[in-house]
Every structure is written in C-alpha cells, then in structure tokens.
Amino acid sequence: MKTLIRALALVALVTLAPSTGAAQVGDGAVRIGADFEILDLEVFPDLLTLFGFGVNGVAFGPSFGYQIGESIIVGSRLALRFNVSELAGAPGATVDGTVAVVPYFEWMFPDPQVAPFVGAQAGVVGFFADGVDASANFVGGGFGGVHLFVTDSFSISPWGQVNFLYLGGLTDRAGFEVVALLSFEGWIGGRSVP
C-alpha cells in the first residue's frame, strides 16, 4: 500500500508542479521503459475472477519502442509475474506465474510536457504452475494514457488497458482484463520532423 501511495504522490507532484521538462523526442527516438501494474482485474465468466492490487500479485516488465514520425511508436512489452506459495502442512513451496510478450502500436499526441496516447496490442501469455502443463494463451486489446515529461528525455506515464483474453487447452475460455499501470520511460535520440 505504501508503494502505491508513493507512486500516486510522485505522479501528483509531477503533474501539479511547474515543469521544466519539455519533450525533445521525434522520428527515430528509442523508448526504453519499465512498466508496473498497479491494478489488475481478470474476469472469465462461469470460471473465475482474479483481482490484483499493489506490487504483489501483479506484473512487472521492460518495454521497448521505436518512434516513427512525430506520433507513431511501435514496440513490444515483456510482462513477468511469479508467485511462490507455501501452505502449512504441504511438502514445500509451489511456484506459478506468467510471461507475456505483447507487441504494440501507439499513437501519441505530441506535446512538449504532457503527451496523451492511445494504442492497440496483441500477444501471447504463457502460464506455468507446479504440477500443471504450461499453456500459451492470447491477449489483445486497447490502451491509453499520458506521458508526463519530467525532463526532455524522461517521462512518467500513468495508463490503462482493456484486453480480451483467451485461455486455450482444456480450459478453452474467453474473458477480459482491465489493468492500470505506471511506466517510467527514457527517450533516446530522435529528431523533429519538418
């Protein structure tokens, strides 16, 4: 809970404080980021509902993007989630988790300090657990948020996703996911498009 409060305080500080940062990104810029899930709600009707909040139980991962022109960014995200559980009376700990690789297309509305964005993504999520065969599942959907430029090459970006989920194999179920995230991004290189 303290981590969430600190993250929200940092976003409020950056948003409300006078900013000296002004984005200098443009065509050819490379964006390297760290994405943290803050909230995750997954619903599979007639099967289960999962809810994760805070740092434990939600995913973290690096992202990479390449800017084309002033507004288009293409890239991919890697999301990692691992859980280790030890039950009283059980022989040892159990491990489960997910690994997702999700390519994306983003349209950014360029602004020197606050740049809103929307996009689409689709990828594969691998699930593994002790005693269960690993499975590959589908995720796809849309996202949107805002890049808050703290300096000309660093942004803090609160954003959200709404995704369609498909669990294959014996489960063969479809569901949806709503995710709130916070990203810290470095922007390297790039030039203005005349």
Image (cartoon, helix red, strand yellow):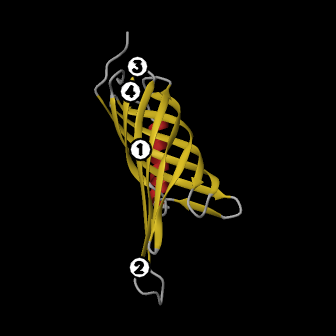
In space, the residues marked 1 and 3 are separated at their CA atoms by: 21 Å
* The label number, if any, that marks residue 67 in the structure image: 4
From the top left corner, tell me how far across and down residue 162 is, in percent: 60, 44
For label 4, the SS is strand
Residue 141 higher or lower than 38, as above or below: above
From the top left corner, tell me how far across and down residue 124 is, in percent: 47, 49
In the picture of the structure, the residue carrying the numbered disc 1 is 77
Of mark 1 and mark 3, the one earlier in the sequence is: 3
Q: Does the rendering let one see residue 56?
A: no
In the rendered structure, are the residues bearing label 4 and label 3 in contact, judged by CB atoms less than 8 Å apart? yes
Residue extending furthest toward the front: 169
Disc 2 residue type (three-letter): Ala
Of mark 4 and mark 1, the one earlier in the sequence is: 4
Disc 3 residue type (three-letter): Gly
* The label number, if any, that marks residue 69 in the structure image: 3
Of mark 2 and mark 4, the one earlier in the sequence is: 4
Q: Quadrant of residue 98?
A: bottom left
* The label number, if any, that marks residue 93 in the structure image: 2
